[in-house]
Structures are given as C-alpha cells and as structure tokens.
Amino acid sequence: MIKKISIEELKLGMFVHKILEQKGDLSVKSQGRVSSMEMVNILRKRGVKTLAIDTDKAFTPETKEDIPAEKITPDPVTTPVVKVKKVSLENELARATKLHEQGKEIQRILQMNLQKEMPFDGSIPKAFSNKLVESVDRNPDALLCLTKIREKDDYLLEHSLNVAILLANFAKFLGMSEEEVQDLSYAGFLHDLGKIKIPDEILHKPGRLTDSEMEVMKKHVQYGVDHLQKTDLDEALVRAIGEHHERLDGLGYPNGRKGDEISNAGRMLAVADMYDALTADRVYKAGMSSKKAFAILMNESPARLDKYYVQQFIKCLGVYPVGSLVMLSNERLAMVLQQNDSPFKPVVKVFYSAKQGHYLTLKDVDLSQEKTVTVTKAVIASEYNIDINAFFERSVSIG
C-alpha cells in the first residue's frame, strides 16, 4: 500500500516509493529502502518535505544481523556509493589526458568570448562536461590524477576544469542521478568565468590583496552570473555558480546569503572550489597537501561550510587522494594510484628516495598487502624539488 508521510516520519526499514514535495534545486528521483539514518539526513539535506512510501516493501530492522543482506543494500541515489572502475587506470589515462587538454582550450575560448562580450554558446562546454562524467564513469581515478598536473601560469584555466572533475566524482560518490552529476560538473566548469574581467594586476598579484583590491576581486562572481543569465542555462545552475563564495554564516559574497538561503549545489561547489584553490600551485606559492586542505575545510565547517558535504567530500577523495604524494616509512616517495578499502593503505607508485635524493626504478605497491611499509605523511613535490608534471608525463601517463 502506498502511503504519504512527512520527512520527519521517515524511519529505518521504510521503502521510499516517490518524492512528493521537495524544496531545493537538486531533485531526488529514485526509489529505495531506508537502511540508515544517514539516508534520512541526506533526504532532509536535499529539501525533501513529503514522500510516498510502499508499506508492503517495508521491514523492521531489529539489529543489523537480523536484516538479510539484500535488504541492507543502500539505494545508490541517496547514499555514498563504491567507485566501480569499468576500465583500468592506464587505459583511461590516454583518453582523460586528451580530455584534460581539450578542457583547458575550451576554457580559454569561453574566457576570451566573455572578455569580448560575445554571445555564450553552451553546446560545446556542456558536451565537454558530459564527456568528463563519462570518463569518471569508466574510471574515476584517471581525471583525479590529472588534477594534480598543474601549470602555474594556467591556474585560471585549470581551476575551473579541476572543480568540474572534483564535482563529477563527488556527485557520483553521493549517488546522484546522471543528470545531476552532469549539471554539477557543468556548473563547476563555468563557475569562475567572471574572473577574466578582473584586472590582471589584481588577478595575478603575487601576494595578499588589499581591502580595495579584494572588493574588485569579489565582483568576478557577479560578472559571471550576469553573463550566464543572458543565456538559456538552467536557472538552478546559475544560482549555484553565484553561490560558490557564499558562506553559511552570511559573511560570504556577493549577496551575503546564509543558512538555508544557499542551495545544496552551491554548498557542494563551495567545498570543491576551496579545496582546489588550497592545493593548487600558484606563481607566488606552492599548493598545500590534501591533508592540510582537508583540515582547513573541517575548520570552516559547520559555521561557514556545510559539515555534511565537507565530510562526504573527504570520504570521496580519501585520506590520500589519487595523484597526491606520500612519504613511506622506508623514506621513499610515492604517488597514490588507487584507493583501497583501508583509507590508509592505497596502491602507490614508488619513485624517489628521500634519504638518498635520487629517483628510483618505478614500482607499484599495494600497501594493503604490505606488512612492513606504511604511509607516514602526505607531502608536496616542491618540498623535494620534484617536477611532478615531468614525472607524471614520463612515468604515469601514456601517449
């Protein structure tokens, strides 16, 4: 029997047949059984107000052991899902590398068109964003690896591309629908278009901006929104782009929105945007390690960033994200290639002796199978004068 209930009445074991009423821009469309209170919290986060449940498919969970395995399988659209790799990292890297270069060129064209106030043609960037999602579908680690390959002078191009990649992975991890994943990736790809209208002496200043310069910099959000509002771009996407610097405490910009005034897409975009900015190499500074960036994100929540999305974002990327560098207990450096079930024991490519200061014969090591070698800390390439781009092209990527 189908029964209408409020989100407050939703309990463990109930089977959600349909979402009837939802406030927010990211819609939930799938059916599924509620196997954890985290699922209820996710639905509440997405603004679900009323639902239809199928009482014939419900069950009463006494303890986890009492529930048959098939009944505790989470609904992939409402809970974090395991990354499934349809092709190997090596096979996907070839396509992903070409895609990454295409993305930078498309960004360059979009920015040039905005600078010249030419009409916006969304067909090419939209199709490109969809191809990013297809790559993530095949192997989510390939494009994540490429987010670590940065040219200091190309920050503006690479940042939006990287945010699009991060959001595609993040949305997939949260189990969102294919349409939602594509929309979020597209929003990430376009979110910083307005920066091209900021004077170069401010945009590329090698140091802290003055208060007056910061006020000029803040205008980039509105420049981008004004440009995109003249297009047929979905209103919810434009809204999310306009919110990527808003903060839950109301002290963000450009509109000082706070709390529930900020959409879920805007909250997710804010997290991905800040993470990539913190870890990026710039002309005037080296990017920080993922571990330090994660600590800052956590410190920013729940007052400024959404705590739930920060926590899930960190779970999505893992303690040691794919493409990042780690120091091993044998004083060797390695690049993370793949996550394992144990977040502290990834698959890595060992390539450098920190003790002796020279490169080693490359070796892939699955730390989950190693009893004597462990990760001691996350590091950044500049600490050891390593050209990570050259290393990646020579040792990880394929032509």
Image: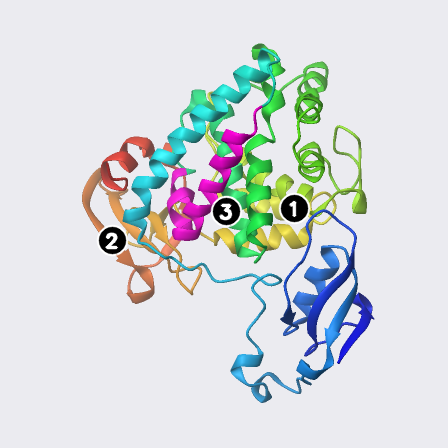
Q: Which residue is mark 1?
A: 299
Q: Quick check: 15 above or below 205?
A: below
Give residue 73's position: percent from left, percent from top.
55, 74
- In x, y percent, where is residue 360? 19, 43
Amino acid on which disc 1 is placed: Asn
Q: Tell me if mark 2 has few (under 14), some (14-19) or many (20+) residues whose alpha carbon lies within 10 angstroms of its own.
A: some
Part of the protein shown in magenta: 121-146
Going 42% across and 65% down the picture, which residue do you hit?
341
Q: Amino acid at mark 3?
A: Lys
Residue of label 2: 364
Residue 166 percent coordinates (x, y): 51, 43
* Residue shown at the point (41%, 42%) measured from the top left: 143
> Which residue appears at 69% of the width and 16% of the height?
216
Residue 334 horizontal side relative to residue 150, left or right? left
- Image quadrant assignment for residue 343: bottom left
Say which residue label 3 marks: 291
Does 144 lie within the magenta span?
Answer: yes
**Whether residue 128 is situated above or below residue 16 in the rendered picture:** above
Residue ranking furthest to the left: 361
Disc 2/disc 1 C-alpha distance (Å): 34 Å
Mark 1 or mark 3, which has the lower sequence index?
A: 3
Report the amino acid beneath label 2: Asp
Tell me if residue 109 comes above or below residue 266 in the rendering.
above
Q: Are marks 2 and 1 in contact (CB under 8 Å)?
A: no
Numbered disc in front, either 2 or 1: 2
Of the image marks 3 and 2, the number of the one nearer the N terminus: 3
Q: Secondary structure at mark 2?
A: strand
Give the secondary structure at mark 3: helix
